[in-house]
Image (tube, helix red, strand yellow):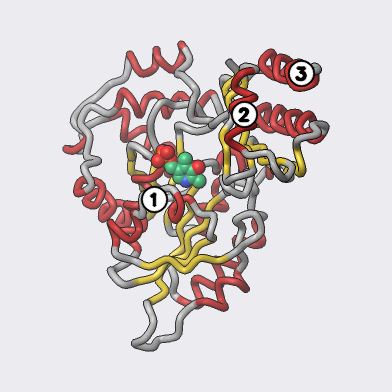
Amino acid sequence: MLELRSDTFTRPTPGMLQAMFSAQVGDDVFEEDPTVKVLEEKCASLFGYEAGLFCVSGTMANQVAINVHVRQGDEVICDQLSHIHLYEGGGVAANSMAALHLLQGDRGRITAAQIREVIKADNVHYPVSRLVSLENTVNKGGGACYDLQSLRDIKALCLQENLALHLDGARIFNALIETGQSPLDYGKLFDSISVCLSKGLGAPVGSVLLGSKSFIHRARRVRKRLGGGLRQVGYLAAAGIYALDHHREGLKEDHRRAREIAEVMKTRPEVKEVLPVDTNIVLFELQPGISAGEYSTQLLAKGIRVLPFYESSIRMVTHLDFTDEDLSKFKSVMTSPD
Ligand SMILES: *Cc1c(COP(=O)(O)O)cnc(C)c1O
């Protein structure tokens, strides 16, 4: 089976398992797990932050961050395709009692001008605009990346309007390797970032939330409240450290393979349009009359697992366990007569 549904299907490599097996651990609720501390400090210094907080998932890291940034009745401004809106179980409402103002960006990327237009005036009728949340790369935008100038414009606006700025960086390492941007630039721009270790980097579990010392201090309490205070979690943090040390460069290869997949899909008669491929996500739309569910079942019969996205779109994602050999197999299946 060729697994292209998500970059979360990777399994730990032997080296990663060894690192987990030999980790030094302690009780992290008492802040006594040395391996968790190494991971948190490593991520924080990579991006230029004072502190980090290990979370079990990207969803938890985002939800903790939003909960620290907003008060009930406040408003979060984000794109309509955002993970925090679509895929976190209504968590912004349920956990933080905040509203979302959804914008329609370009493949999930919003601009300072769009944000400026919807920031609410100080008027009792309105929610208080408190936070802007961006995603990079944008999952539902087919892995689209922001350029640095757009982010700087948004930061300038947030400073001027006294809004906090959060980044859902589930695939930030894909964006960094593709654009050549420095992680230190991100530390200067965002009040908080959630960085995922279990997507392209191939760790089994984990995200790290980054911010100032006082932000992370408050985030630690929220994480505990949500049930995310873990004990000897250094075994998992060790996988994250290993992933940061060994799996960042390989993302470039994932991107190349994704582009090759896109080229193949462009030749298929049942495909109407393939979105531009910026990173490791290939999104395409099927011809009218072909449903995504049907098409994915056909591919499954040929040994290819893909994800139906909307009614008539399909997502394919390359990852650490999708090799050049798998790519050759993919090409031969997709180019052979049915
Ligand atoms: C996967 C993902 C998350 C959440 O990660 P989980 O670890 O699955 O909770 C958040 N944001 C984006 C953009 C994602 O793709």
**Image-based side of 147 in relation to 40, left or right:** right
Residue in view at x 55 percent, y 71 percent:
115
Which residue corresponds to mark 3?
338
Circle nearer the viewer, 2 or 1: 2
N-term mark: 2 or 1 = 1
Residue 213 image point, x, y percent: 32, 53
**Image-based side of 280 in relation to 72, left or right:** right
Residue in view at x 61 percent, y 17 percent:
303
In this rendering, does residue 7 appear at all?
A: yes
Decide: marks 2, 1 in contact (CB < 8 A)?
no
Q: Quadrant of residue 291?
A: top right
Decide: marks 3, 2 in contact (CB < 8 A)?
no
Alpha-carbon span between mark 2 and mark 1: 24 Å
Callout 3: SS: loop
Q: Image quadrant of ligand 1?
A: top left
Residue 108 image point, x, y percent: 60, 56
Q: Amino acid at mark 1?
A: Asn
Q: Amino acid at mark 2?
A: Thr
Residue 95 image point, x, y percent: 28, 56
